[in-house]
Image: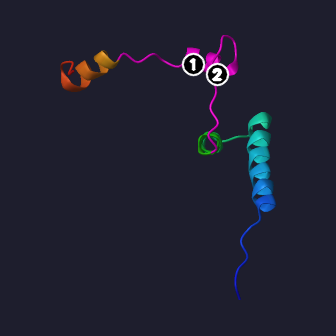
Amino acid sequence: MAKKKATEDQFNELHNLVTNEFLSRIKSGEASTADLKAACDWLAKNDISGVAYEGNPLDKLANVMPKVDPELVQRRVYGKVYD
C-alpha cells in the first residue's frame, strides 16, 4: 500500500501549530532554555530575522550582551594578535 504525502494544507497547519506552541510557552514564561533554542532555530529555518532599532526588544537584548574585543580574545588565546 502506497503512503500518501502530506498536503500543503497539512504542512501549513503543522507550521501554525508549532509556531503557536512556541509563542504560548514563551509568553507564559514557561519556556525552557531548550524551548527558546528550538524557537530560535525555527525562526532561522524559516528565514525569519529581525532588525534592532532603538528601543525594540532586539535592541534591548543587544545592549545587555557583553561586547567582545576580538583582539583581546586573540591575545589571550594565542599570546598575540594574528592578521
Q: How many marks?
A: 2
Q: Secondary structure at mark 2?
A: helix
Residues at marks 1 and 2 touching, judged by CB atoms closer than 8 Å: yes
The span picked out in magenta is 46-69
- Residue in the picture at 57% in, 19% down: 62
Taken as a whole, is the magenta stretch helix, strand or loop? loop
Disc 2 residue type (three-letter): Leu
Instruction: Using a 10 Å C-alpha cutoff, classify the residue at mark 2 as few (fewer than 14 neighbours), some (14 to 19) or many (20 or more).
Output: few
Q: Which quadrant of the structure image shows residue 49? A: top right
**The C terminus: image quadrant:** top left
Q: Which residue is mark 1?
A: 62
| Residue 33 drawn above or below residue 77 | below
Q: Which quadrant of the structure image shows residue 10? A: bottom right
Viewer-side residue, 7 vs 17:
7
Disc 1 residue type (three-letter): Ala
Q: Position of residue 4 (x, y in %)?
A: 73, 76
Q: Position of residue 57 (x, y in %)?
A: 68, 20
Q: Which residue is mark 2?
A: 58
Image side of residue 80 versus residue 37, left or right = left
